[in-house]
Structures are given as C-alpha cells and as structure tokens.
Amino acid sequence: MIEFGTHRDMGIDKYGHEMKVDDLEKVREDKSSRILFVCLGNICRSPTAEGVMRHFAARETPPMKIEIDSAGTAGYHIGAAPDSRSQAVARRRGIDISGLRARRVEPGDYSKFDLMLAMDRENLRALKSARPDNARAQLRLFLEYAPQSGLLEIPDPYYGTERDFELVLDLCTAAARGLIAELQQRS
Ligand code: 4NP
C-alpha cells in the first residue's frame, strides 16, 4: 500500500519550506564552501591558516566538507614548502603543513572559490585590484571571524621571532573556529 502524507523523505530547508531530503542534501552540498587563504608569500600565514582550518574542520562530527587552499599575492616563493618556523609551530600543535607548496593567486581562483580570505589589508587590496569581472568569490579579511582578537590583520612574521609565528598560529586558530561556527550556522 502506498502511504500518502508520510514525511519520511521530506525535510525542512533553512527558510522553513518542506523539501525532499535528496534536494536538501544537494543544497547542503552545493553550499559546501570553497575557501582560499591569501597572504603575500604563501609560505607563512596562509599555509598556517590552511593547515589549522583543515585540522579543525576534520575534527567536526561529521567532518566538515569544505575545500581549502592557500595562495600568495606575490610569486617570490612559488613551489616552496612552508617556512620551517611555521612548520615547527604548527607541528607542536599536531598540525602537519610540510606537504603544502606555495603558489600565486590566479584569475581562476575568483570563480572557483566562494571566499578568499586575506591575512591583512594590503593583500586584500591586492586581491581587490586583480579581481576579474566574472569573479564570484567574496573577498574578506580572515580575522573578521575572530572579533574577540581585537585585530583585523595577521602580522607578517617573516622577519620576526618565534613569538610572531606563535601569534600567527593563535590568530589562525581563533579565526578558524569563528569561520567554522559561521559555516555551521549557514548549513
Ligand atoms: P607570508 O610571509 O606572506 O605570511 O607568507 C612572507 C613570506 C615571504 C616574504 C614576505 C612575507 N618575503 O618577502 O619573501
């Protein structure tokens, strides 16, 4: 017997509309965010942000389905592994970023990614000035997701000390948590 009116295969979308579960899953998958972290050289801050974000997204239950990458607005270090100081600080927190390789932001990134998160205003400006007409990515500062930090920019640690690299990791951790919380609210 066919049962009409059972809601077994129905769910409610975020607007309160009834939808087939299959369609809901599709909407959720479509919303699976693609996020690009951007700094200058792609060897210190943005690979740290990428590693931290991967680490925390994988620890969610169920693990968050997001695509994460990082790139630099400058091409000084293309193909290089993250700075050894960034790798060491991350490793001490159980995060392995040794396999990442630096690349430069490409025009196609603006249509591939939903969010391009710059580490500081200078890199946000560089992203905005190179934005192609067909761009769909939102361009923002990563620290907008960590208002409690009182900062909007992650300072460039390249000519700094180990403490500066620790600060990068702490700020990336705070912002990654904030970003994950916001992505969870949207789904
Ligand atoms: P990042 O740090 O932008 O966080 O990767 C830097 C890496 C290299 C240089 C500057 C900043 N550099 O001048 O080579």
Image (spheres, grey):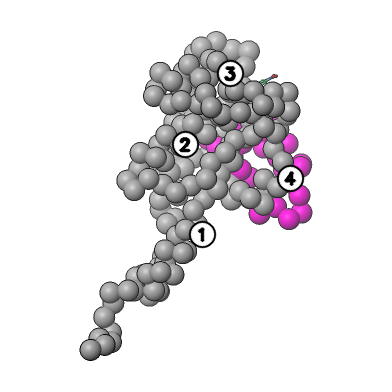
Q: Of callouts 3 and 4, which one flags the residue occurring earlier in the amino acid sequence?
A: 3
Question: Disc 1 marks which amino acid?
Answer: Asp
Q: Residue furthest front?
A: 1
Q: Is residue 127 magenta?
A: yes
- Mark 4 highlights which residue? 107
Contact between labelled residues 1 and 3, with CB atoms less than 8 Å apart: no
- Mark 3 highlights which residue? 83
Contact between labelled residues 4 and 2, with CB atoms less than 8 Å apart: no
Where residue 148 appears, x then y in whole percent? Answer: 44, 34
Asked if disc 3 is less than 8 Å from ligand 1, the answer is yes
Where residue 55 appears, x then y in whole percent? Answer: 42, 34
Residue extent of the magenta highlight = 116-143
Left or right side of 136 for 14: left
Question: Disc 4 marks which amino acid?
Answer: Pro
Q: Residue at x 51, y 59 (%)?
A: 30
Asked if residue 84 is positioned above or below residue 152 in the image, the reply reads above
Which quarter of the figure has residue 155?
Answer: top right
Q: CA distance from mark 2 to mark 4?
A: 23 Å
Q: Of callouts 3 and 2, which one flags the residue occurring earlier in the amino acid sequence?
A: 2
In front here: 80 or 176?
A: 80
- Mark 1 highlights which residue? 30
**In the rendered view of the protein, which quadrant contains the C terminus?**
bottom left
Q: Of helix, strand and loop, which one carries label 4?
A: loop
In front here: 158 or 30?
A: 30
Q: CA distance from mark 2 to mark 1?
A: 20 Å
Q: Of helix, strand and loop, which one carries label 1?
A: helix
Q: Of callouts 2 and 4, which one flags the residue occurring earlier in the amino acid sequence?
A: 2
Q: Of callouts 4 and 1, which one flags the residue occurring earlier in the amino acid sequence?
A: 1
Q: CA distance from mark 4 to mark 1?
A: 22 Å
Callout 1 crowding tier (Cα within 10 Å): few <14, some 14–19, many ≥20? few
- Mark 2 highlights which residue? 53
